[in-house]
Amino acid sequence: MEFGWSEDQRHRYEQTLAATLDAFPGGNSPAFDRENWCTAGKLGLLGASLPVEYGGQGLGALDTALVFEAFGRGCLDTGLVFAAAAHLFACAMPIAEFGSATLRDRVLRALSCGDLVAGNAMTEADAGSDVAAMSTSAERVDGGYLLNGTKTFVSNGPVADVFVTYAVTDPEAGPFATTAFVVDATVPGVEIGTPLDKLGMDGCAASSVTFDRAPVPDDAVLGAPGQGAMVFQHSMSWERACLFALYLGVQDRLIEQSVRHVRARKQFGKRLAEFQSVSNRIVDMKLRVESARLLLYRTCWAHDAGEPTVLFAALSKLATSEAALAGATDAIQLFGYRGYLRDQGIEAALRDAVGGTIFSGTSDIQRQLIALEMGL
């Protein structure tokens, strides 16, 4: 069993980290920034796992995760990193895998370089984790479909040029009831809601998207009609394996900041680092992130090897998201009132971490998946 990185992996990680630190020196953005988005495209971050022929790097899951780990560590705007990950894993990868040749030629290169922004339109008000309760429908017409319904909490929704969405095409078909579509944001019948006022991830805009008889041609169907669940599971496999690597990077950065702070800060005539309760807290932060890292790398390895990933992806997602939340809370305790102030950037990590325990399946949903995989 090999735990070391190859020379290429180490070089790619260090190169990505250095380029990210140089390109994104500021803190959290108050809103999505198109210039930063294009910069991420130029650095190859938006197309890390896309095929080379479409402008991507052609990386597997593990190498892609290392790229996003470096991106998350070097870029203080975690919302931007998350927006890029949602764009790539939930939208671009399903198009690369299941899109028609016409569709791939039309959008993939632009998605890879940042000329286009993709929005993941899956969640509905009454069908979050319960995807079987989806009400958005697609009516078959000559040459394509007409979509009707409303999606909510669409990542990149207010700024998206294209949406990957899912709709019921045959209510009686059980697991084959839904179909996946790619919809241009400018077609008639697409109405984008106002940006949601969220707790964190400010650099990733989100909104509702309503489809009112929005036309979608046949060549914009992903896979075949009725394969929506398969397309969605494919995107979740990439997302749960790779997206949460960004939180590993954020945690590495918080630990470094915390270590520097407790070495320099003195109270009661001693450095904070000399208090066992302080050092223990940082040890716990390190333990959680390294444990999560092993699970995430294990998931990516299985993905690249073509092995089942449901169990390890759920374990990894649960461990990484909960570690990010606990680690950010610990960092605020270590920094005291400084951590509570916005200008330190510590409190932003906490706000950004909360969403990680909710999107891509809540922590309780991950526990349910793990239990099912264990035969419980």
Image (cartoon, rainbow, N blue to C red):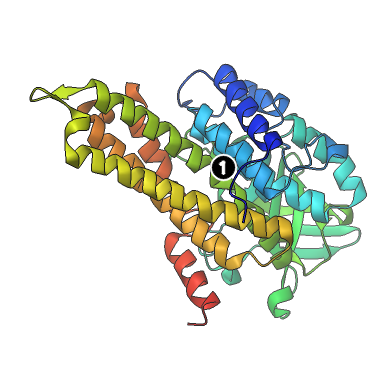
**Position of 37 relative to 142 (above/below):** above
**Position of 88 relative to 367 (above/below):** above
Give the quadrant of residue 23. top right
Residue 366, position in %: x, y? 48, 64
Of the pair 262 and 311, the residue shown nearer to us:
262
Q: Can residue 139 be seen in this view?
A: yes
Q: Residue type at mark 1?
A: Gly
Quarter of the rendering occupied by the N terminus? bottom right
Horizontal arrangement in the rendering, residue 166 relative to residue 126 (left or right): right
Query: What residue occupies the far front of the structure in this picture?
Result: 1
Horizontal arrangement in the rendering, residue 372 relative to residue 330 (left or right): right
Q: Report the number of discs.
A: 1
Residue located at (86% from left, 46% from top): 103
Of the pair 300 and 96, the residue shown nearer to us:
300
Q: Is residue 134 visible?
A: no
Of the pair 278 and 274, the residue shown nearer to us:
274
Residue 84, position in %: x, y? 62, 37
Residue 66, position in %: x, y? 61, 40
**Position of 284 relative to 38 (above/below):** below
Of the pair 332 and 123, the residue shown nearer to us:
332
Crowding around mark 1 (Cα neighbors within 10 Å: few <14, some 14 to 19, many 20+) is some
**Residue that carries the numbered disc 1 in the rendered image:** 193
Secondary structure beneath dot 1 equals loop
Residue located at (53% from left, 34% from top): 72
Give the quadrant of residue 115. top right
Residue located at (31% from left, 47% from top): 284
Residue located at (22% from left, 31% from top): 273
